Amino acid sequence: MNTHTGSWLSRNKWIPILMGIAVSVAAWWAFRPEKLFINQKVNEAAPAALSLEPEALYTGKLEGKVHHTSGRATVYKTAEGQEYLRLSDFTTSIGPDVHVLLVRAEDQALDGEIVKGEIDSVELGSLKGNQGDQNYALPERADLNKYHAVAVYCERFHAIFGVARLEKF
């Protein structure tokens, strides 16, 4: 007669439970899902020059694509010669891995919501917040005669949140 009253797994069911908890904690720590979405208001002051106000070179109004996006994008040049992009009265939806790019205004990808393939761009940095005024330094290689539009772009989903086509001030 079999006096064995249950399987090993039913007698030790706490082991798979502990393993599941350990795997869940490790996955949370590795992927940090709470850091995927930026929902932060930023209010940076414009970079101040000691003697002269920065000169506005280009400006454009942000228009939403995949998500409602609004505000103004303006490229300034300081007295020292540094160029920077300022997003003012800016607002967009929260999203993962959102970046600010300089792009070609004539790029056909800007007419759609999702980018299929590569987009010719200059990376200005990760979006600092989904609301408020913020500044992004333009790298030396940023040719404003070639890249004369600004895109708020989600790299994870290849989605364009908003675009501003820049015109001379």
Image: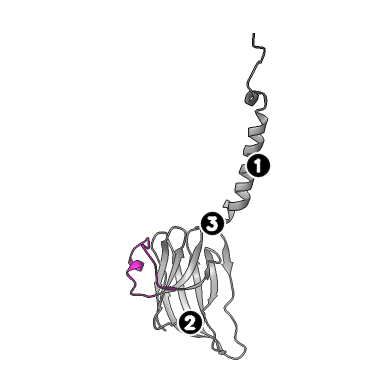
Q: Label 2 vs label 1: CA separation?
A: 47 Å
The one of 15 and 34 positioned closer to us in this rendering = 15
Q: Is residue 140 above or below residue 98?
A: below
Disc 2 versus disc 1: nearer the observer: 1
Q: Mark 3 or mark 2: which comes first in sequence? A: 3
Q: Which mark is residue 58?
A: none
Residue under label 1, please give it: 22
Q: What secondary structure is found at the residue carrying circle 1? A: helix
Judge whether residue 111 is colored magenta: yes
Residue 99 image point, x, y percent: 49, 66
Disc 3 versus disc 2: nearer the observer: 2
The one of 97 and 85 positioned closer to us in this rendering = 97
Residue 47 image point, x, y percent: 58, 80
Residue 32 is at least partly visible in this image: no
Viewed as shown, does residue 163 lie left or right of 1? Answer: left
Residue under label 3, please give it: 37
Q: Mark 2 or mark 1: which comes first in sequence? A: 1
Q: Is residue 56 above or below residue 134?
A: below
Query: Please, what is the three-letter code of the amino acid marked with disc 2?
Result: Arg
Disc 1 versus disc 3: nearer the observer: 1
Q: Residue at x 64, y 38 (%)?
A: 19
Q: Which residues are magenta?
A: 104-121
Q: Which mark is residue 141?
A: 2
Q: What secondary structure is found at the residue carrying circle 3? A: loop
Q: Is residue 32 above or below residue 48?
A: above
Residue 152 image point, x, y percent: 45, 67
Q: What secondary structure is found at the residue carrying circle 2? A: loop
